[in-house]
Amino acid sequence: MAKEEQPAVRTDEQSHASKLSQGMLKLERINCPLCGSTESSVVITSNDKLGGVPGEFHVERCHACGHRFMNPRPALVSLAACYPQQYGPHQSVPRGVADLGRSRISANDINPLGAIGGRPLYLRILPLGQVPGLKKFYEWLVDDRSQPVPVATKETRRGEESGPIKSSLKKKPRALELGCATGQYLIQLQDAGWLATGIELSERPVTIARDAGLNVHRGTLETTDLQAEQFELVAAWKVLEHVPDAKATLRRLNTLLIPGGTLLLSIPNAGSWESWFFGRSWYVWELPRHLHHFTPSSIRKLLEECEFTNITIIHQRNLSNVVGSLALAILARWPESRFGRRLLRYPDRPTTATKLVLAPFAHLLAWMRQGGRLTISAKRGTSESRP
């Protein structure tokens, strides 16, 4: 493949990049983080197309287990430097609970009722609101199955009598979100009856979350002091691909859950058609922030090794990766393309109209088990379920 021209970096990214020199981002060479093999070869070489961190980075494929991972990767002291001030997920500000436009699901069902922020489109056009069945069709169409919000019940709390939690905080089940960014999901959990706690590495989103009154620890899972078997629910949305040691992270999360507690994850699907079709322009290579590239089979095997059971993997109905990848492909060829720049903003700021246009294709790809992102649910095994 011919060497691609790279898109120009935005001004805010240039400011971040100017604070870093090639030598400041310390990299370290590693063995395969899943199986420990020392044999791997480069499959992708790219710069940071989204954040402007200087340098050229590599993704390698393990010869033993097939896992793809960044190698060499940022050392622990350099992790925070990989995230520019304008990193997309860190820009949102938590809104009032009534304005989130979210849906709820039962604690035992990870298929959420999809929602798009703001008033549903079919209610903005008065005659459409009267069409029989339109509401259910609209909700099915926009349900991308990406971020379920389980409703806390007394049944969630260590098998007590079922029913919605409406009493004091002491009786609320506890939930932890790893990589909570500015706390949007924490607010949704609170409204659904959970006593929610977050962990976030970067200073700016932690400040925003705390200003919104949320309980957020700044740091990593390893540096945060949490007691074992403290949570009924742990969520990590778009996080596992960022952590240096995914296996150690999952094992730690397992110990934080009560027996039978639920783990919820979302990760990019490196086993879908997107990665090979777009090549170096695949939006979620996202070097140097994405350190792992999982497939459905590799993440299932990893969860089983970390003593999780009842694993469910759902292909999301979401084409954000495709739009972002198309933008990068356009900008690689035409760096000054305004259309490419506009498309590149979409994954962080999706619009309702575009979602509706893309929804039928997203549903089809998910049905074919070729979704670009995965939503995963698993349980911590109880003493009875373990061998």
Image (spheres, rainbow, N blue to C red):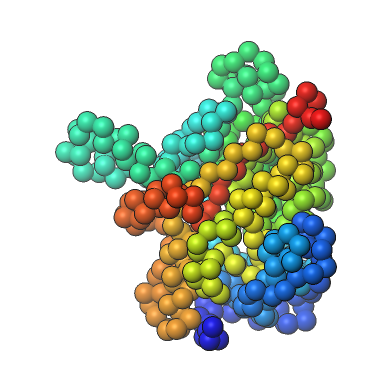
Residue 260 in view: yes
Name the residue located 30 percent from the left edge and 35 percent from the top edge: 135
Asked whether, in this view, residue 315 is left or right of residue 336, the answer is right
Q: Please say if 358 is above or below 187.
A: below
Q: How many marks?
A: 0
Give percent across and percent down for residue 321.
49, 61
Residue at the image position 51 percent from the left and 56 percent from the top: 372
Quadrant in which the N terminus appears: bottom right
Q: Is residue 145 left or right of residue 264?
A: left
Question: Can residue 89 be spotted in the picture?
Answer: no
- Tell me which residue sits at (80%, 47%) in the image: 224
Quarter of the image where one finds residue 20: bottom right
| Residue 218 horizontal side relative to residue 108, left or right | right
**Considering only vertical position in the picture, is 296 above or below 129?**
below
**Horizontal and vertical percent position of residue 317:** 44, 49
Nearest to the observer: residue 240 or residue 315: 315
Q: Residue at x 62, y 30 (%)?
A: 194
As rendered, which of 218 and 296 lies closer to the eye? Answer: 296
Viewport quadrant of the C terminus: top right
